C-alpha cells in the first residue's frame, strides 16, 4: 500500500476524529489539509434527481484510492468559445440541457438566468484503484462511481473562485447537491461499507 492510500485508510479507521459533510451527488467527504478532500461514494447519500453535470472553480487531480469510477466529460457546443469538429468525425449526438452559474458550498444556489445548452458527451473514462486523472476547472463532467469507492481530490488553486457551472436536462428542474453536515449514523454506515469493500 502506498503512503497516500495508507493515510486515507488511517483517516477512515478513525472517522469521528474528522468533520464530514454529505454532498448531494452521493458522497461523504472531509477536508485533507488546505487543498485536498477525501470522498467516500455511496448512492444512499445521493439526492433524488440531483443535477450532477457540473464544472469546478479550480483545476483538480483525482486519485482512486479504492473502488472504481467512470469520469464522463462533456463539451458545451453552444458556448461562445466552442470550435466545431470536422463534420466527417463520427460524433455522438448533442444532448439538450440547461446551463446556469452557481454559487458553490453551503448556502449556494443558482446565479442569474439559466440558458439553453447543447452538451456533446465524450467517451467515458474508466478508472480503478491506484489510477488518477486530471481535469481543468472549466471542464464539464459527471462522476459515476460504484458504491464504496474512495477518492482523493487535490485542488490546484489559482485565483480563488466561489462559483462554477451546472447543467440539467431540458424540461426538468435543477436539483441542488448543496453539502450539509453528515450525521453520525451516515458516517458509520458509509465508511464501514467502503472499508469492507476495500479489504475484500
Image: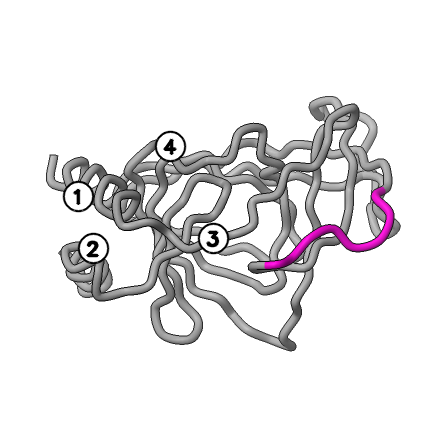
The reply, left or right, for residue 185 in relation to residue 120 is: left
User: Is the residue under label 2 in contact with that under label 3 (CB below 8 Å)?
Assistant: no
Q: Which of marks 1 and 4 is nearer the N terminus?
A: 4
Of the numbered discs in the image, which one, if any, rests on residue 44? Answer: 4
On the rendered image, what quadrant is the N terminus found in?
A: bottom left
Mark 2 vs mark 4, foreground winner is 4
Q: Earlier in the sequence, mark 2 or mark 4?
A: 2
Of the numbered discs in the image, which one, if any, rests on residue 180? Answer: 3
Instruction: Place residue 69 in its image quadrant.
Output: top left
C-alpha distance separating marks 4 and 3: 15 Å
Of the numbered discs in the image, which one, if any, rests on residue 12? Answer: 2
Magenta span covers which residues? Answer: 107-114
User: Is the residue under label 1 in contact with that under label 2 (CB below 8 Å)?
Assistant: yes
Dot 4 lies on which element?
Answer: helix
C-alpha distance separating marks 3 and 2: 19 Å
Q: Which of marks 4 and 3 is nearer the N terminus?
A: 4
Amino acid at each position: 500500500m502506498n503512503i497516500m492510500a495508507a493515510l486515507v485508510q488511517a483517516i477512515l479507521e478513525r472517522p469521528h476524529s474528522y468533520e464530514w459533510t454529505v454532498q448531494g451527488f452521493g458522497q461523504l467527504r472531509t477536508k485533507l489539509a488546505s487543498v485536498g478532500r477525501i470522498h467516500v461514494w455511496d448512492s444512499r447519500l445521493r439526492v433524488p434527481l440531483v443535477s450532477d453535470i457540473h464544472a469546478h472553480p479550480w483545476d483538480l487531480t483525482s486519485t482512486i484510492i479504492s473502488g472504481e469510477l467512470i469520469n464522463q466529460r462533456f463539451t458545451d457546443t453552444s458556448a461562445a468559445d466552442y470550435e466545431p469538429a470536422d463534420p466527417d468525425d463520427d460524433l455522438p449526438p448533442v444532448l439538450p440541457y440547461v446551463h446556469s452559474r452557481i454559487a458553490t458550498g453551503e448556502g449556494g444556489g443558482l446565479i442569474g438566468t439559466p440558458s439553453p445548452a447543447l452538451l456533446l458527451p465524450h467517451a467515458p473514462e474508466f478508472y480503478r484503484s491506484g489510477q488518477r486523472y486530471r481535469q481543468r476547472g472549466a471542464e464539464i463532467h459527471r462522476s459515476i462511481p460504484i458504491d464504496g469507492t474512495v477518492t482523493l481530490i487535490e485542488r490546484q488553486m489559482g485565483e480563488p473562485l466561489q462559483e462554477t457551472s451546472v447543467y440539467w436536462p431540458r424540461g426538468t428542474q435543477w436539483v441542488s447537491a448543496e453539502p450539509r453536515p453528515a450525521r453520525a449514523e451516515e458516517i458509520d454506515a458509509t465508511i464501514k461499507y467502503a472499508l469492507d469493500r476495500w479489504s475484500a
